[in-house]
Amino acid sequence: MAAQGKKLVVVTGLSGSGKSIALNALEDLGYYCIDNLPVSLLRTFGRQLLNGQGVDYQRVAVGVDARSESEELQLLPGLFLDLREAGLACEILFLEAQDEILLQRFSETRRRHPLSTPQRTLADAIALERELLEPLQSSADLHLDTSRTNVHQLRDLIRDRVADRAPASLSLLVQSFGFKHGLPRDANFVYDARCLPNPHWQPELRPLTGRDQDVARYLQSEAKVGRLLDHIIDFLEYWMPCFEADGRSYLTVAVGCTGGQHRSVYLTEQIAAHFSAQGRNVIIRHRELS
């Protein structure tokens, strides 16, 4: 069929969260990219891509933002459903960041927020944009929180999770983090490892991380660590096939401890190794070690 192997990715999200970086990364990886395409034109474009009528590209990425009409943004999830049913592989990638980070980025770059006006403050513009994009956020296939992600890390995530993922396969991201630095906003499941023995209180282990063998041996000697690891793996082994059967393309699992250096890092490495050995598409990210 005409759409065989073709893929359309809509890149959207809050201004200042990295939409242009994501589009540039996809373009470097062979996607034909269009930024700020009005949603009213996306239906026609998708149909042309589907039928090969003047738009003969295998992989296309389109940037959409809150400058489109609110009514059009609300129609986009339904439009995607129609295109998927017609045989076109479609995904929505939603980028966001914490409000204070967005405020800082706009202040540093002195860029004007697209929804700001003399009567609307930057904070109010960000709040309005969140409201306008809520339909896309709710229906997005993949959420990426770029609050603590630099340009190079975002490019790597786009490559690993979107561009290099095999068709019809579930992309599993397992990441460690520290609760004292805040919860990850883009995780589907969050596990708390703060109840486990803490290598931080062992002076010789304090400067190390969960990737070091001395820390691994310490944690492996604690029965509670193995029990929590088994419970997490058992949960994911049971539910991941259900997510795949439901058409889910991405799953993000976060494991946290106090500082994100020892326990969460060790568990993340073990979970990723287990599912990698099964041949799954697994990505590891240690938020506080980057």
Image (cartoon, rainbow, N blue to C red):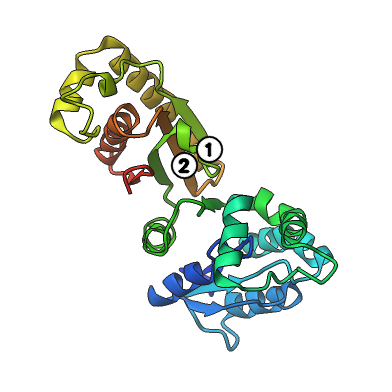
Q: Residue 147 at what x, y percent from top left?
A: 51, 52
Outermost residue toward the top?
Answer: 223
167 or 268: nearer the eye? 268
Q: Which of the numbered marks, if any, corresponds to residue 276?
A: none
> Does residue 77 appear anywhere in the picture?
yes
- Crowding near the residue tagged with mark 2, few <14, some 14–19, many ≥20 C-alpha atoms within 10 Å: many
Q: Residue at x 66, y 52 (%)?
A: 137
Q: Residue 162 at what x, y percent from top left?
A: 44, 60
Residue 129, quarter of picture: bottom right
| Marks 2 and 1, how far apart at CA | 5 Å
62 or 106: nearer the eye? 106
Q: Amino acid at mark 1?
A: Asn
Judged left or right of residue 18, residue 38 is right
- Crowding near the residue tagged with mark 1, few <14, some 14–19, many ≥20 C-alpha atoms within 10 Å: few
Q: Residue 219 at what x, y percent from top left?
A: 23, 20
**Of helix, strand and loop, which one carries label 2?**
strand
Residues at discs 2 and 1 in contact (Cβ within 8 Å): yes
Q: Residue at x 37, y 42 (%)?
A: 288
Residue 227, quarter of picture: top left
- Chain-order first, disc 2 or disc 1: 1
Residue 48, quarter of picture: bottom right
Check disc 1 and report the residue beneath it: 188
194 or 170: nearer the eye? 194
> Does residue 96 appear anywhere in the picture?
no
Q: Residue at x 15, y 24 (%)?
A: 204
Q: Residue 253 at what x, y percent from top left?
A: 44, 37
Check disc 2 and report the residue beneath it: 252
Q: Amino acid at mark 2?
A: Thr
Outermost residue toward the bottom?
Answer: 54
Q: Residue at x 53, y 64 (%)?
A: 18
Above/below status of 101 relative to 235: below
**Of helix, strand and loop, which one carries label 1?**
loop
